[in-house]
Image (cartoon, rainbow, N blue to C red):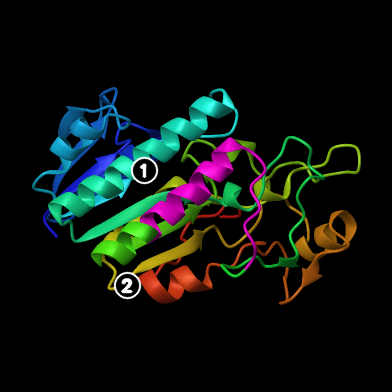
Amino acid sequence: MKRVLVTGGSGRLGREVIKALSKGNYEILSLDVTAAENNDVQFMHVDLTDRTAVCDALAGADGVIHLGAVPGPLAQPEADTFRTNVVSTWNVAEAAAIHGLKRIVFASSVFVLGWHEDATAFQPEYVPVDETHPLTPLEAYGLSKVVGEETMSAFSRRTGIPVVSLRIMNVIQTDGYNALPWPTPTLDSLVQYTHWPYVDVRDAAKACCQALEASTAGHEAMYIAAEDIRFDTNTASLIQKFLPKTEIRHPLPGRASVISIEKARKLIGFSPEFSWQH
Protein backbone atom coordinates (compact mmCIF):
# COMPACT_ATOMS: atom_id res chain seq x y z
CA MET A 1 0.00 0.00 0.00
CA LYS A 2 1.73 3.13 -1.19
CA ARG A 3 -0.59 5.82 -2.61
CA VAL A 4 -3.53 6.49 -0.27
CA LEU A 5 -6.35 8.98 -0.82
CA VAL A 6 -8.32 10.53 2.03
CA THR A 7 -11.66 12.04 1.10
CA GLY A 8 -12.75 14.78 3.47
CA GLY A 9 -9.09 15.22 4.28
CA SER A 10 -9.60 18.80 5.46
CA GLY A 11 -12.13 17.82 8.10
CA ARG A 12 -11.40 17.33 11.78
CA LEU A 13 -11.05 13.55 11.52
CA GLY A 14 -9.49 13.79 8.06
CA ARG A 15 -6.64 15.96 9.32
CA GLU A 16 -5.93 13.50 12.12
CA VAL A 17 -6.01 10.55 9.73
CA ILE A 18 -3.52 12.30 7.44
CA LYS A 19 -1.33 13.04 10.45
CA ALA A 20 -1.36 9.35 11.40
CA LEU A 21 -0.72 8.20 7.83
CA SER A 22 2.19 10.62 7.56
CA LYS A 23 4.07 8.52 10.10
CA GLY A 24 4.14 5.66 7.60
CA ASN A 25 5.60 5.23 4.15
CA TYR A 26 2.61 6.55 2.23
CA GLU A 27 2.10 8.96 -0.62
CA ILE A 28 -1.00 10.82 0.59
CA LEU A 29 -3.53 12.81 -1.41
CA SER A 30 -6.24 14.79 0.39
CA LEU A 31 -9.53 15.29 -1.45
CA ASP A 32 -11.94 17.97 -0.26
CA VAL A 33 -13.79 21.08 -1.35
CA THR A 34 -11.53 23.26 0.82
CA ALA A 35 -7.84 22.94 1.65
CA ALA A 36 -6.71 22.60 5.26
CA GLU A 37 -3.98 25.02 6.29
CA ASN A 38 -2.11 22.48 8.41
CA ASN A 39 -2.17 19.55 5.98
CA ASP A 40 1.35 19.29 4.56
CA VAL A 41 0.30 16.82 1.86
CA GLN A 42 -0.84 16.97 -1.72
CA PHE A 43 -4.35 18.41 -2.03
CA MET A 44 -6.93 18.15 -4.79
CA HIS A 45 -10.19 20.11 -4.87
CA VAL A 46 -12.88 17.51 -5.58
CA ASP A 47 -16.66 17.60 -5.26
CA LEU A 48 -17.40 14.00 -4.33
CA THR A 49 -20.81 14.16 -5.99
CA ASP A 50 -19.03 14.70 -9.32
CA ARG A 51 -18.53 11.19 -10.70
CA THR A 52 -15.92 12.15 -13.29
CA ALA A 53 -13.86 14.19 -10.84
CA VAL A 54 -13.83 11.36 -8.31
CA CYS A 55 -12.88 8.80 -10.93
CA ASP A 56 -10.02 10.99 -12.15
CA ALA A 57 -8.78 11.60 -8.60
CA LEU A 58 -8.63 7.90 -7.70
CA ALA A 59 -6.55 6.95 -10.73
CA GLY A 60 -3.26 5.46 -9.57
CA ALA A 61 -4.33 5.01 -5.95
CA ASP A 62 -3.78 1.84 -3.95
CA GLY A 63 -6.30 2.56 -1.22
CA VAL A 64 -8.87 5.14 -0.15
CA ILE A 65 -10.15 6.20 3.26
CA HIS A 66 -13.56 7.69 2.53
CA LEU A 67 -14.46 10.24 5.22
CA GLY A 68 -16.02 12.95 3.06
CA ALA A 69 -19.70 13.49 3.86
CA VAL A 70 -22.27 15.83 5.30
CA PRO A 71 -21.14 15.31 8.91
CA GLY A 72 -24.37 14.88 10.86
CA PRO A 73 -28.16 14.85 10.91
CA LEU A 74 -28.61 18.59 11.49
CA ALA A 75 -25.89 20.02 9.26
CA GLN A 76 -28.03 20.35 6.11
CA PRO A 77 -31.62 19.68 5.00
CA GLU A 78 -32.29 15.95 5.12
CA ALA A 79 -32.75 15.54 1.37
CA ASP A 80 -29.40 17.23 0.72
CA THR A 81 -27.67 15.14 3.37
CA PHE A 82 -29.01 11.89 1.95
CA ARG A 83 -28.23 12.75 -1.66
CA THR A 84 -24.73 14.04 -0.97
CA ASN A 85 -23.66 11.13 1.22
CA VAL A 86 -25.16 8.37 -0.91
CA VAL A 87 -23.96 9.73 -4.25
CA SER A 88 -20.48 10.47 -2.88
CA THR A 89 -20.09 6.96 -1.53
CA TRP A 90 -21.32 5.42 -4.77
CA ASN A 91 -18.83 7.51 -6.74
CA VAL A 92 -15.91 6.52 -4.51
CA ALA A 93 -16.83 2.82 -4.65
CA GLU A 94 -17.32 2.89 -8.42
CA ALA A 95 -14.03 4.70 -9.00
CA ALA A 96 -12.22 2.24 -6.74
CA ALA A 97 -13.67 -0.61 -8.78
CA ILE A 98 -12.71 0.98 -12.09
CA HIS A 99 -9.12 1.54 -11.01
CA GLY A 100 -8.75 -1.74 -9.09
CA LEU A 101 -7.84 -0.32 -5.68
CA LYS A 102 -6.53 -2.78 -3.12
CA ARG A 103 -8.67 -1.63 -0.18
CA ILE A 104 -11.38 0.80 0.89
CA VAL A 105 -12.08 2.16 4.37
CA PHE A 106 -15.50 3.76 4.77
CA ALA A 107 -16.46 6.03 7.66
CA SER A 108 -19.89 4.95 8.81
CA SER A 109 -21.44 6.08 12.10
CA VAL A 110 -23.08 5.04 15.35
CA PHE A 111 -26.14 6.85 13.98
CA VAL A 112 -26.93 3.78 11.86
CA LEU A 113 -28.46 2.40 15.06
CA GLY A 114 -31.08 5.13 15.28
CA TRP A 115 -30.79 8.77 16.28
CA HIS A 116 -33.69 11.16 16.74
CA GLU A 117 -34.15 14.51 18.43
CA ASP A 118 -36.63 12.73 20.70
CA ALA A 119 -34.37 10.81 23.10
CA THR A 120 -37.05 8.15 23.62
CA ALA A 121 -37.33 7.29 19.90
CA PHE A 122 -34.57 4.67 19.93
CA GLN A 123 -33.72 2.14 22.60
CA PRO A 124 -31.36 -0.76 21.90
CA GLU A 125 -32.62 -4.31 22.24
CA TYR A 126 -29.53 -5.25 24.24
CA VAL A 127 -26.20 -3.91 25.46
CA PRO A 128 -23.39 -3.77 24.81
CA VAL A 129 -24.49 -3.28 21.22
CA ASP A 130 -22.50 -5.33 18.72
CA GLU A 131 -22.62 -5.83 14.96
CA THR A 132 -25.53 -8.31 15.14
CA HIS A 133 -27.84 -5.65 16.57
CA PRO A 134 -30.48 -4.41 14.09
CA LEU A 135 -29.85 -1.12 12.32
CA THR A 136 -32.93 1.11 12.52
CA PRO A 137 -32.03 4.62 11.33
CA LEU A 138 -34.65 7.28 11.88
CA GLU A 139 -33.32 10.16 9.76
CA ALA A 140 -31.42 10.92 6.57
CA TYR A 141 -27.88 10.93 7.93
CA GLY A 142 -28.08 7.54 9.63
CA LEU A 143 -29.95 6.12 6.64
CA SER A 144 -27.29 7.45 4.26
CA LYS A 145 -24.63 5.60 6.24
CA VAL A 146 -26.61 2.34 6.10
CA VAL A 147 -26.97 2.77 2.35
CA GLY A 148 -23.25 3.57 2.21
CA GLU A 149 -22.38 0.33 3.96
CA GLU A 150 -24.63 -1.63 1.60
CA THR A 151 -23.07 0.14 -1.38
CA MET A 152 -19.59 -0.80 -0.22
CA SER A 153 -20.71 -4.37 0.43
CA ALA A 154 -22.16 -4.65 -3.08
CA PHE A 155 -18.99 -3.36 -4.74
CA SER A 156 -16.87 -5.66 -2.61
CA ARG A 157 -18.95 -8.68 -3.68
CA ARG A 158 -18.71 -7.63 -7.30
CA THR A 159 -15.00 -6.81 -7.42
CA GLY A 160 -13.39 -8.65 -4.53
CA ILE A 161 -11.96 -5.39 -3.14
CA PRO A 162 -11.80 -5.65 0.66
CA VAL A 163 -13.80 -2.94 2.44
CA VAL A 164 -13.96 -2.05 6.12
CA SER A 165 -16.85 0.13 7.29
CA LEU A 166 -16.05 1.78 10.61
CA ARG A 167 -19.10 2.73 12.67
CA ILE A 168 -17.41 5.59 14.44
CA MET A 169 -18.83 7.05 17.65
CA ASN A 170 -19.24 10.75 18.44
CA VAL A 171 -15.69 12.03 17.90
CA ILE A 172 -14.06 14.03 20.70
CA GLN A 173 -11.30 16.42 19.66
CA THR A 174 -8.15 16.70 21.74
CA ASP A 175 -9.34 20.06 23.06
CA GLY A 176 -12.83 18.78 23.83
CA TYR A 177 -12.21 17.02 27.10
CA ASN A 178 -13.04 20.08 29.17
CA ALA A 179 -16.69 19.31 28.37
CA LEU A 180 -16.44 15.79 29.79
CA PRO A 181 -17.86 14.12 31.71
CA TRP A 182 -21.34 15.18 30.71
CA PRO A 183 -23.92 15.76 33.47
CA THR A 184 -25.71 12.57 34.43
CA PRO A 185 -29.04 12.31 32.57
CA THR A 186 -32.27 12.80 34.44
CA LEU A 187 -35.88 12.10 33.55
CA ASP A 188 -36.20 15.78 32.71
CA SER A 189 -33.00 15.89 30.63
CA LEU A 190 -32.76 12.66 28.71
CA VAL A 191 -29.78 11.98 26.41
CA GLN A 192 -30.10 9.95 23.21
CA TYR A 193 -28.53 6.51 23.55
CA THR A 194 -26.34 7.16 20.51
CA HIS A 195 -24.75 10.07 22.40
CA TRP A 196 -23.67 7.99 25.38
CA PRO A 197 -20.58 6.53 23.65
CA TYR A 198 -17.72 8.53 22.16
CA VAL A 199 -14.22 8.07 20.74
CA ASP A 200 -11.12 10.23 20.76
CA VAL A 201 -10.21 11.61 17.34
CA ARG A 202 -6.74 10.05 17.64
CA ASP A 203 -8.20 6.61 18.28
CA ALA A 204 -10.64 7.03 15.38
CA ALA A 205 -7.74 7.99 13.10
CA LYS A 206 -5.73 5.03 14.31
CA ALA A 207 -8.66 2.73 13.50
CA CYS A 208 -8.76 4.10 9.95
CA CYS A 209 -5.08 3.32 9.49
CA GLN A 210 -5.45 -0.15 11.01
CA ALA A 211 -8.41 -0.90 8.74
CA LEU A 212 -6.35 0.20 5.75
CA GLU A 213 -3.59 -2.28 6.57
CA ALA A 214 -5.77 -5.13 7.85
CA SER A 215 -5.96 -8.50 6.14
CA THR A 216 -9.76 -8.76 6.11
CA ALA A 217 -11.64 -10.00 3.06
CA GLY A 218 -14.98 -8.96 1.67
CA HIS A 219 -16.94 -6.28 3.51
CA GLU A 220 -16.72 -5.99 7.28
CA ALA A 221 -18.56 -3.44 9.43
CA MET A 222 -17.43 -2.75 12.99
CA TYR A 223 -17.91 -0.30 15.84
CA ILE A 224 -15.15 2.06 16.94
CA ALA A 225 -15.57 3.46 20.45
CA ALA A 226 -13.82 4.39 23.67
CA GLU A 227 -14.14 1.84 26.45
CA ASP A 228 -16.25 4.11 28.64
CA ILE A 229 -19.27 6.41 28.36
CA ARG A 230 -19.43 10.20 28.59
CA PHE A 231 -21.00 10.23 32.06
CA ASP A 232 -19.36 9.91 35.47
CA THR A 233 -22.02 7.39 36.43
CA ASN A 234 -22.33 3.62 36.65
CA THR A 235 -23.39 2.37 33.21
CA ALA A 236 -25.60 -0.48 34.41
CA SER A 237 -27.58 1.87 36.65
CA LEU A 238 -28.18 4.22 33.70
CA ILE A 239 -29.48 1.31 31.61
CA GLN A 240 -31.77 0.12 34.37
CA LYS A 241 -33.17 3.61 34.97
CA PHE A 242 -33.54 4.97 31.45
CA LEU A 243 -33.67 1.82 29.28
CA PRO A 244 -35.55 -0.68 31.47
CA LYS A 245 -36.56 -2.88 28.51
CA THR A 246 -32.98 -3.21 27.27
CA GLU A 247 -31.31 -6.54 28.02
CA ILE A 248 -27.85 -6.37 29.62
CA ARG A 249 -26.16 -9.33 27.96
CA HIS A 250 -22.71 -8.88 29.41
CA PRO A 251 -21.47 -7.19 32.58
CA LEU A 252 -20.99 -3.42 32.36
CA PRO A 253 -18.69 -2.62 35.27
CA GLY A 254 -18.17 0.99 36.28
CA ARG A 255 -18.51 3.39 33.35
CA ALA A 256 -18.12 0.66 30.71
CA SER A 257 -19.11 1.52 27.16
CA VAL A 258 -22.51 0.50 25.84
CA ILE A 259 -20.84 -0.42 22.53
CA SER A 260 -18.82 -3.58 21.94
CA ILE A 261 -15.54 -3.12 20.06
CA GLU A 262 -14.58 -6.79 20.18
CA LYS A 263 -14.95 -7.26 16.43
CA ALA A 264 -12.67 -4.31 15.69
CA ARG A 265 -10.22 -5.55 18.30
CA LYS A 266 -10.13 -8.98 16.66
CA LEU A 267 -10.11 -8.03 12.97
CA ILE A 268 -8.00 -4.87 12.83
CA GLY A 269 -6.26 -4.83 16.22
CA PHE A 270 -8.12 -1.76 17.48
CA SER A 271 -7.58 -0.84 21.12
CA PRO A 272 -8.51 2.69 22.24
CA GLU A 273 -5.85 4.61 24.15
CA PHE A 274 -7.70 7.75 25.20
CA SER A 275 -10.44 8.45 27.72
CA TRP A 276 -11.80 11.42 29.63
CA GLN A 277 -10.95 9.49 32.80
CA HIS A 278 -7.20 9.82 32.25
Question: Quadrant location of residue 186?
Answer: top right
Question: Quadrant location of residue 182?
Answer: top right
Q: Residue at x 82, y 45 (%)?
A: 120
Q: Position of residue 154 (x, y in %)?
A: 37, 59
Looking at this view, is 144 or 234 the one in front?
Answer: 144
Element type at mark 2: loop
Q: Please tell me whether residue 217 belongs to the stretch shown in magenta.
A: no
Q: Please tell me whether residue 149 belongs to the stretch shown in magenta.
A: yes
User: Main SS of the magenta segment?
Assistant: helix
Q: Residue at x 54, y 34 (%)?
A: 72
Which residues fall within the magenta stretch?
A: 133-153
Can you identify the residue that label 2 sits on? Answer: 216
Looking at this view, is 155 or 205 the one in front?
Answer: 155
Q: Residue at x 14, y 51 (%)?
A: 99
In this view, which residue lies farthest toward the front?
158
Can you identify the residue that label 1 sits on? Answer: 89
Q: Position of residue 256 (x, y in %)?
A: 67, 65
Question: Quadrant location of residue 187?
Answer: top right
Q: CA distance from mark 1 to mark 2?
A: 20 Å
